[in-house]
Amino acid sequence: MAQATSGSLSAGFSASDPPTLLHLPRGVLACIASKFDSPKDRLSLEASCHTLLAASRGELSSIYWGGPRLVFSFYSDEDVEDATALLAARRPTVSALNLETSSEIPYDAPLLPSPPLPGLKELRLLVLGFSPPEWDSVLQHSHLTSLVLANCWFYEGAGAQPLRVLNALQQLEMSGPRDDEGYPVSPPPCLQLAGCSQLTSLTLSSCDLGDLPPGLTTLSALCSLHVRCDDLSAAQHWSDLTHLRQLTQLKLERCYLEEVPEPLSHLTALRNLWLHANWDLERAWERLAPLTGLTFLSLAYTQFSHLPAVLSQLTGLETLDLLGCNQLTASDEAWRPLQGHPSLRFLNAMWCEGLAAVPALLSTLRRLEDVNFCLSGRLREGGGWRHLTALSSLTRLSLTGCGLQGMPAELAAFAEAGIARL
């Protein structure tokens, strides 16, 4: 039985109150739900629930209440009816709702009550297959500002009505189901975004898109876009990004990119950029040159042997993530783009198995505060620890999992100051 997750505690609940899980027979919840909003009644109700819990052997539903947030885990049509009854009783107070299930059988009843819950702003649905009435009950809540559809799919006839009817949405996160090998199964039919003009954050993971969703170019308020686990390697897939010049955060994760998409050169408002887990990404790095406002760049799991030359032009960069760049060597040529970089403060070189020594050019990065070499096991072969002693701003050096038998003598001062850790 899945455990209910914690919610925000308010409306008469103190942070010290333990979460209360109910496993009650069908119909009982609706009878007692109306008392939840009174702190005095809640205390007496909690004692009553222990008795009801002992009397109930079915354990049909798992429910956690925390002020205006409700979390449900259910496994049958009866559980859905319990949840619907409870929501109907608490209509005025529910502002955030989580629903999750492990069943792959669609439920016959709508997930949410009608008329819509007037105060519901945040809705999270986990591992759900939508039938037409279930999906329609979601879309009737047109005042939602945040919607998460995690590992959800649509049965035949569901999803015909698109998401654009939720025109108050500010945050949308969708992830589709995957097959046994981890590949996305089918694209969501509802992904039409033309009416979602207030959307500021969009995450699409394992949605088998085939292309960026229709209506993306109309999202003039969008500041954060995350696309993950979809084969969008062809250049034409990214043309719509040209219109999203207000983006400050962009994640293109495991999109099978072989070159930096050309539209990225137009996104000069970007501050944070993830291009991680694109193993074959090796061309057109110069397209990042106009992004002089970048402060964070992740190139994790990219299989280059030399850092891209464009890094020398990203003079505002403060954090560089090179996690799992196993082909990257320690040669001066490989690290030349970072020589004397004026602003780099955080360097993640964790699990870089090609580093057989500390790169000598790190000694020129005088603003470095935090360096992570964890699990870069070949560092012990070539040493080069003296190159780190010039880093007067260093406050943290992580060497866990590097196979060192003890702290290198060159780093004794760092160890004594609590900066270097094995």
Image (cartoon, rainbow, N blue to C red):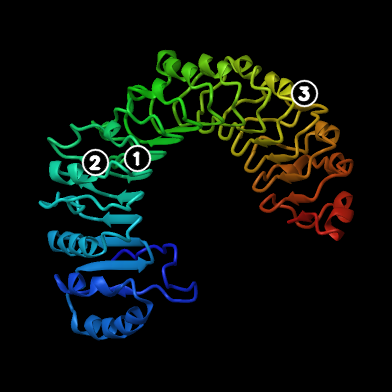
Determine the image quadrant of residue 268.
top right
- Residue in view at x 35 percent, y 74 percent: 20
315 horizontally vs 127: left or right: right
What number is the disc on residue 175? 1
Mark 3 neighbour class, 10 Å CA radius: few under 14, some 14 to 19, many 20 or more: many
Determine the image quadrant of residue 320.
top right
Label whose residue precedes the other's in the sequence (3 or 2): 2
Vertical placement of residue 412 versus 386, above or below: below
How far apart are the two marked residues, 3 and 2, measured between alpha carbons?
A: 53 Å
Q: Position of residue 372 (x, y in %)?
A: 70, 45
Which residue, given by chain and number where applicable, does mark 3 sit on? 336
Vertical placement of residue 276 versus 29, above or below: above
The amino acid beneath tag 3 is Arg
- Residue in view at x 20 percent, y 35 percent: 159
229 horizontally vs 269: left or right: left
What number is the disc on residue 139? 2
Mark 2 neighbour class, 10 Å CA radius: few under 14, some 14 to 19, many 20 or more: some
- Residue in view at x 76 percent, y 49 percent: 397
